Amino acid sequence: MNGQLPLLLRPVERLGDGALSIVESLGRFGGFLGQAIGIMLTPPFKWRAFVDRINYIGFRSLLIILLTGAFTGMVLGLQLYLTLSRFGSEAFLGPAVALALIRELGPVLAALMVTGRAGSALTAELGIMRITEQIDALTVMALNPLRYLVVPSLLAGLVSFPLMTALFDTVGIFGGYLVGVKLLGLSEGTYFGEMQTFVHMDDIMTGFWKSALFGVVVTWVATYKGFNVGHGAEGVARATTQSVVLASVLILVWDYFLGSVLP
Amino acid sequence: MIKVEGLTKAFRGQPVLRGVNLEIPTGSITVIIGRSGGGKSVFLKHLIGLLRPDAGHVIVDEQDVTALHGRALDQVRQRYGVVFQGGALFDSLTCAENVAFPLREKLGLPRAETVRRVDAALAQVSLEGAAGKYPAEISGGMRKRVAIARALVIEPQIIFFDEPTTGLDPILVNTIHRLILELHSRHHFTALIVSHEIPEIFEIADSVAMLADGRIIETGPPAAIQASRNPVVQKFIRGEPE
């Protein structure tokens, strides 16, 4: 016996190996977050690194958030006006733009934009730190690299994503206003008045919870992929791609689930 | 004293270390030589606790490092300084900040004391002028010297050097070797150097061990290694092609 299964059973064995490998990866992925949360709850807290990460993830993404927010709002304003005017309901343009942005498009698009800009950069930065042994250097100094490199990013994601989403929503609503009111002639009072009537605190909280969760998901994926990078430049490139793709897919998957659960 | 007993490690079924035995006396400079890809860096990573062996032990002053985890392992690492192959300096920090980092984060020293020790450490490696520069702005040789200053600044009892002169020109190689020797005579730390700088490395070593095929095949003072009758050792020292 050479320990190999009969020819017919080998595909089953390969399938089992693949399934085991996926379960192991998920375990490592979850364990990584668990470890980071454990460290988050024990002092010392690295304020300087946290502020640096807020700047890296949040502040440096402002321009892209402002641009995409404005144009998303303008597109929504234009398309919804054209649609609503067919039913004689253009008065509802304000709440339609606001609800679409606050509940759905704001959290999702802001998260996708930050994933493309900061998530990929975070993975690449940590990946390079891994292959140049900077992460090992922290370990042998008896300093936990998760405390310095992962926890500040996770918390920065948690804080900055809702703020950036709020900015995206606000700019988007004014983008819709620009098109609906200034370009297409809807009254300003109708645009904002109806918005006040139809947009409730629940809608705002739905967007808030979504964006906070996306902040954790994006930074979790980005730091995990950076920490577990393969060899050389190719390994960093692969990890960066995987990080952006996985984070983007998870944003959309979680958006659906949260959309079904939240009021 | 660092004692390595039967250290064995394989990656994906491919054996790299096949039962390494070695003793590193306290206060000595021990050099590990061997061919590229021969497992020298893997061996070093076991000593500093970055890798766990499949079998065997690394005993540092009666403590088995391979059995330690978490804080207990960190306690042993408090005594270590490590100079990585590429320096492993933090890109986002200046040279002075890199050297100050372990002082600030590990020892929590007051600012004035940190500045004093950083200045002294950079002066020891003749890099006073590079304090405000980032690692990307200095040469490879300077990066290695900053890495040595960072390892030295916390006054460790044991310093591991992973190929500290790889990629440097012969003048810089000798400069770094002389620097290690000078710092060793001043601070009396135990040094383990992984290197394949032959024959320059023999000038600073108290003891040399050759790693080949995952085992230590010869160990002794530099003169004994140079006079070894082992054909593998001789072939390596003379740099004879396959």
Image (tube, coloured by chain):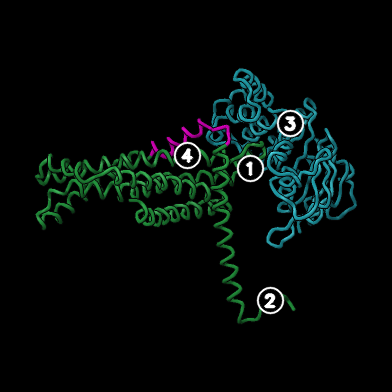
Chain colours: A green, B cyan
Mark 3 touching mark 4, by CB under 8 A?
no
2 and 4 marks on the same chain: yes
Mark 1 touching mark 4, by CB under 8 A?
no
Q: Which label sits on residue A4?
A: 2
Q: Quadrant of the N terminus of chain A?
A: bottom right
Q: Which label sits on residue A136?
A: 1
Instruction: Pick the residue in front: A198 or B42.
Output: A198
Q: CA distance from mark 3 to mark 4?
A: 34 Å
1 and 2 marks on the same chain: yes
Mark 3 or 4: the one toward you: 4
Mark 3 or 2: the one toward you: 2
Q: CA distance from mark 3 to mark 2?
A: 51 Å
Q: Which label sits on residue A155?
A: 4
Q: Chain of mark 4?
A: A
Q: Which residues are magenta?
A: A42-60
Q: Is residue B196 magenta?
A: no
Q: Residue furthest top?
A: B112
Which quarter of the picture shows residue A160?
A: top left
Mark 1 touching mark 3, by CB under 8 A?
no
Q: CA distance from mark 1 to mark 4?
A: 23 Å
Q: Chain of mark 2?
A: A
Q: Which residue is mark 3?
A: B156
